[in-house]
Image (tube, rainbow, N blue to C red):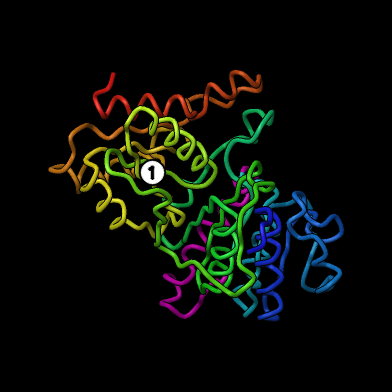
Amino acid sequence: MPVITVREALRQALEEEMDRDENVILIGEEVAEYNGAYKVSVNLLDKFGPDRVIDTPISEEGFTGIGIGAALVGLRPVVEWMTVNFSLQAMDQVYNNAAKMLYMSGGQLNVPVVFRGPNGPAEYLGSQHSQALQSIFCHCPGLKVMAPSSAYDAKGMLKTAIRDDNPVVFLESELMYGWKGEVPETEYVIPFGEANIKRSGADVTLISFSKPLKLLMDASVELDKEGIDTEVIDLRSLKPLDEITIYNSVKKTNRCVIVDEAWPFASVGSHVAYLVSRNCFDYLDAPVLLISSEDVPMPYNHRLELAAQPSVKKIIDAVKQVSYRI
């Protein structure tokens, strides 16, 4: 099986879906002539031409609205935000147009659009470009939200998002674009609402998604050395959420630690903690713990930047706490 980067996996998904359906288009800043800010759209302009791979002005509100309008008249746009931080400029379009149109039209108007781009902290980007904004999109009825953690998932999940008749927010990570993994050459898709058990274990359930999955897997290796057997769940689909896989795991392990690189207040992680506490209360042998970024703007200083985010050490300490090893 070929080993490719997340960047290439996303590019393959875009190319294959554009080959499959002539209504799929890609729009955004620098997606065409520059091959994408993170080179996800390399060579797509050469293959599909300027009518289907379209550079836009620097106006997220404008080209997000164009994508929604194009979806309403039969196209299937993929709208690339250079960073999800910039989606804040287009939130009225996403919340009040894309998300609500099917409901407000009584089921007559679908909006098959994908909004995609890097989300969450990277490195040396400062307070305005290092935000993990997934909870904003999960909060809004009418939006589906996906967040892959590997090249395999990135390709299969993006294909699913493009084929869906509803607006999908597809959250990537700048630091993940160069990560490599096995990706089949054969056709496959990964459905909404299906979490992935990345590692089976008996003692503690670890739950996360996107880039922090690597922290969970690294922490699990260290915890093995201390005789703590962790089960790692990758949510993948944030909305809809695979609650059954979460509950089944916690009922087996009786302990749960959740990792989310967003701020703690009203985050996806805090919502999952609420669900586990409510629906698995009788099975829990310890309180559910959430490891998040600190509730502060992201520092620019690199040591402070790392200190503000989840880490392997923080995860190990939390697991030991719920296991009463501290």
Residue under the point 52% across and 43% down: 133
In the image, the segment drawn in magenta is: 85-113
Residue 312 lies, in percent from the top left, at 48, 29
Q: Which residue is located at x 84 percent, y 70 percent?
A: 50
Say whether residue 175 is left or right of residue 193.
right
Q: Is residue 160 above or below residue 79?
A: below
Name the residue located 44 percent from the left edge and 63 percent from the top edge: 142
The residue indicated by pointer 1 is 207
For residue 101: magenta? yes
* Count of numbered tags: 1
Q: Position of residue 298 (x, y in %)?
A: 58, 26
Q: Position of residue 134 (x, y in %)?
A: 49, 46
SS class of the residue under badge 1?
A: strand
Q: Is residue 261 visible?
A: no
Q: Amino acid at mark 1?
A: Ile
Q: Position of residue 140 (x, y in %)?
A: 43, 54
Q: Nearer the viewer, residue 186 or 94?
A: 186
Q: Dominant secondary structure of the magenta stretch?
A: helix
Q: Nearer the viewer, residue 11 or 262?
A: 11
Q: Quadrant of the N terminus?
A: bottom right
Q: Is residue 274 left or right of residue 260?
A: left
